[in-house]
Each structure stands twice: as structure tokens, then as C-alpha cells.
Image (cartoon, rainbow, N blue to C red):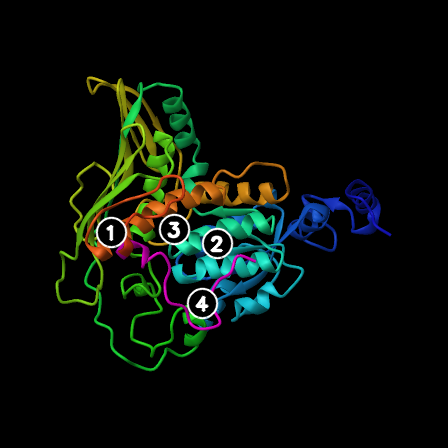
Amino acid sequence: MSVNRRDFIKKVSVGAAGIAVGGKVMGMSAKSYNRIIGSNDRLHVAIAGLGRRLGAFYEPISVKRANVELLYLCDVMEKQRVGAMQNFSKQIDYKPKLENDIRRVLDDPKVDLLINATPDHWHTPGSIMAMQNGKHVYVEKPCSHNMLENELLVEASKKLNKVVQMGNQQRSSPHTIEIIDEIHRGIIGKPYKALAFYTNSRGEVPLQQKVPAPAGLDWDLFQGPAPRREYTSETWNYNWHWYGWDYGTAETGNNATHELDVARWALGVDLPQRVDVEAAKRHYENDGWEMYDTMDATFRFNGNKIIQWDGKSRNGYDTYNGGRGTIIYGSEGSVFVDREKYILYDRGGKVVKENSASSNEGGIALGGGGDMTTGHVINFFEAVRGKEKLTAPIDDASISMAMVHYANIAYRIDKGFDVDEGTGRIFDRDAMKLWSRDYEPGWEPTAW
């Protein structure tokens, strides 16, 4: 016989679970008690990928208002599973299960949703597998590794009727929402151009050398959908970003995703009509970094609007007075916005208004997390419950993601191209050859 939430709480209050005294319930901690009273609305969560982004999920998992229970911590590296358990033990008073294989996690019908923080090449395949197993998905950026995956991810979310949010957390930033709304209401006149930027001073990357896989690493499962090869040193621990295209999406997929999304949001544009790129490896010429570390990209849109990307991975010159951000130009003024603030200027360049947010979300630091991510993840939880609308639904986030893939494709074929803004297809045969990628046989993603 089922018991509704009101009846359950009433029974607890008269003694079924004890009497509350001094903020505790006799026989259990206050945390445990709170887990019980919200059980009818509780979501059961699994996290796959326990690397540098793990810290971003401590708060959204543990805060009372989230009302979730963490069932699984999953990673292909044993020490990351153990470390995640130790770190979460400071946040929650129960123990999730540790698991190596994401497929076993997704087989568990108790899991309601997956937080997918795996490497890039696992994002779409892992997310589609989760949806096929009845789970909703919060997928870190980049949500896809290539344009085919971009399409399949959106298709799967629609066909399988699952809530999917990408981790472009600035969409849940109050000060960013405020100024974008003002831009859309005409505060700078007609917005016509956005310049998005990222500046970092990443160092030298080791050359790859064939060595045995590190102890505790399931190298075969790390590769997952990617073609199999022998392990090379330094690959599994972040440097997969720069070691070819089997795993990563370069700095544009790693970081431009965020600022290009804000730029497109501000201008109110969808797919571009034209993409041009100048990019090259310009630092540490003989190190192990295998793609560009410097990129200038230009995206042209209907309505004579333009987005430019200035990405400098290994030159820390502070061109725009901030490590990352977006500048939006309008017919009557301009706006600078980043994760910490926005500044509104009139057409003459005079500051009209400034909002320095109380955000504690880092800019270019590895991993991180903070209040924007917490708000973004909780927005996802509430959308799964049907109580809020997603701030970054996958069908819209995938449009920003397409800009990343176009930029990478233009770099790889060393020429720009026109785009069908209705379908996203590229009017260039060489470019369309990179629409997808090679997969390990049996690992090819399908929409459902």
C-alpha cells in the first residue's frame, strides 16, 4: 500500500522515526532524517567521470534543497573512485557504490539520472546509453565529439523523452541572464557583433611514449567508443585533450563552448552561414601537443551579425582584461560579460552600469565548480521533476556546440566554408568527411 508524502511525514512526526530534539532526530542524524522526509520527490544519481570536474558536484549533490541520493561513483581509474569516495564522505553521511564500468551503473533501474563528466569521446555515447536505459542526463561540455553525435544526442532526447542539459553553466548565472535579457530588450540598440575570448598560459606537454597502462586504469574501457591503440604515457590524465582527435576536441571544445554559447545567446542567432578560421600550434614547437594552441575564428550569421573567437591556450597576455568572457557590440552601446560581472557601456564608451556578481565560479582554473554550476545542476534536477524549465536544453545547446565542431573542422581541412543554416550541413566535401569519426566496431552510437 502506497503512502503519500504528507501522510508519511505525519507518521514520522508522531514517532515512527523518532522525535526531533535540538536539530536532530533521536536515533539518526538530521541529514539522514532529511533524506527520509523528501523521499517521494528524491532523485537517484550516478556520476561517471571522477576527474577534475568532480568538485563541481559536491554541493549540488549534498545540499538539502537538491533532494537527491548519490547511488554510484563511476570511473575507469581506481584511485579516482577511491578519492571521490573520500571527498564525498565529507559532504554526505552515506556511501555510494563504486563502479568501474558505466554500463553496469546504467543497468541499475534505481538510477534516475546520470551526470556524465567523462572525457569528450564518451559524452554522446555514454549519454545515449543512459537514455536508452531510462535515465535523464546532465552532460558536461562538450556535449558531443563531432557533428553526427551532436545530431544523435538531440534525436535521442526527443525520441526517448529524456531531459538532457549540457554543462554550459553560465546559462544559469543570474547576472548573465539579467544583462542578456536587457540586450534582448534593446539596451545597446541592435546587437551586431560578439567577441568571445579565452586566455591561458598552459605549459609544455610531454611527448607520448608507449608504456604499460597505469595501475588501476581500465585502458580498454577508457577508450570505449574510440579505436583501440596501445597506451601512451600521460594520456589518461587530462592530456588526452591535446593528443590527437580520438578523445578530445581541442581548446575550442574544452573552453570555447562556454563563451561561444554566451555570444550566440546575446546576439539571438542560431547556426552560422559562414565559418573561417586561422589556427596553429605556436608554442613549444617540439612538445607533445598535437593540435592548434592558438585560434581566431569568425562566424557569420543571417542579419549581418558576426561572432569572433580569440582563443589563446598558451599565451597569457591579458588582451581583454580577463581570462575569459564575451564582449557584445550594439548600435547604441556595448557590454562586457564574464563569470564574475557585466559592464554596460554607452556608444561613447562610458560606463553606464556595472554588476559585480557574488559568483564564486572560477574562470580558467582546472576543474573548479561554484554557485553557477550548483544552480545549473539543481535547475536540471528540478526540470527532471517537472518544476522548472531547463536553462540549457540540449536542442539549443547543440547549436552552440556545432560552432565548436565547425571551427575544428575548418582548422583540420585548412579552409573556411559555407553552412546551410537550416540543416547545419557544410557546403564542402572535405569538411563533410569530418562530420563523424572512426569508432571501435560495436561502439557506434545510435539514437535509440
Q: Nearer the viewer, residue 251 or 420?
A: 420
Q: Earlier in the sequence, mark 3 or mark 1?
A: 3
- Mark yes or no: residue 156 visible: yes
Inspect the magenta stretch and tell me whether residue 3 lies in it: no
Mark 3 residue element: loop
Q: Please give the label number shown on residue 410.
A: 1
Q: Nearer the viewer, residue 201 or 146?
A: 146
Q: Whole-percent x and y of residue 382?
A: 59, 41
Q: Residue at label 2? A: 152
Q: Residue at label 4? A: 80
Nearest-to-viewer mark from 3 and 2: 2
Q: Nearer the viewer, residue 166 or 307?
A: 307
Q: Whole-percent x and y of residue 9?
A: 78, 43
Disc 3 from disc 1: Cα separation:
30 Å
Q: Earlier in the sequence, mark 4 or mark 2?
A: 4
Amino acid type at image mark 2? Leu
Q: Residue at label 3? A: 368
Residues shaded magenta: 430-448
Disc 4 from disc 2: Cα separation:
30 Å
Q: Earlier in the sequence, mark 2 or mark 1?
A: 2
